[in-house]
Amino acid sequence: MLQKNEAFEDWKIRKSGGDLLIRVPEETDMDILKVQFSDLISPIAPLIKSPKATLKFYVGNSDEADFIFTLN
């Protein structure tokens, strides 16, 4: 569902153990994204279906996650 949203079309998103691994373009300013991530996700958060009560988003612009966002 996230990848169908225009705001996230250049993000690579995959599932891992019920959580989401998100790779954003390399040129993304990760400090700004970390601050703005909850605002980006909040409009679609009610539509995200997960078997887990707590969903984690591991977000980075390389092989390592720069930050983890937790959705309860």
Image (tube, rainbow, N blue to C red):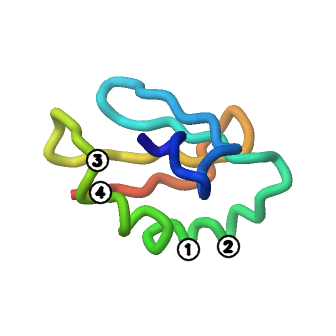
Q: Earlier in the sequence, mark 2 or mark 3?
A: 2
Q: Which residue is mark 3?
A: 48
Q: Left or right: where does residue 46 sit relative to residue 57? A: left
Name the residue at 62% across, 51% down.
66
Image x and y of residue 15, in percent: 42, 27
Q: Amino acid at mark 2?
A: Ile
- First along the sequence among labels 4 and 3: 3
> Which residue is under mark 4?
71
Report, in whole angstroms, how far the alpha carbon at label 2 lies from the one at label 3.
23 Å
Q: Secondary structure at mark 4?
A: strand
Q: Residue lying furthest right in this view? A: 27
The span from disc 4 to disc 3 (Cα, nearest Å) is 10 Å
Distance (Cα) linking label 1 and label 4 = 14 Å
Q: Which residue occupies the foreground of this view, 66 or 51?
A: 51
Say which amino acid is labelled 4.
Answer: Leu
Q: Are marks 2 and 3 in contact (CB under 8 Å)?
A: no
Reading the image, the residue beneath label 2 is: 32
State the separation of the CA atoms marked 3 and 1: 18 Å
The residue carrying mark 1 is 36
Instruction: Please name which of the two marks, 4 or 3, marks the residue nearer to the observer.
Output: 3
Residue 63 vs 65, above or below: the answer is: above
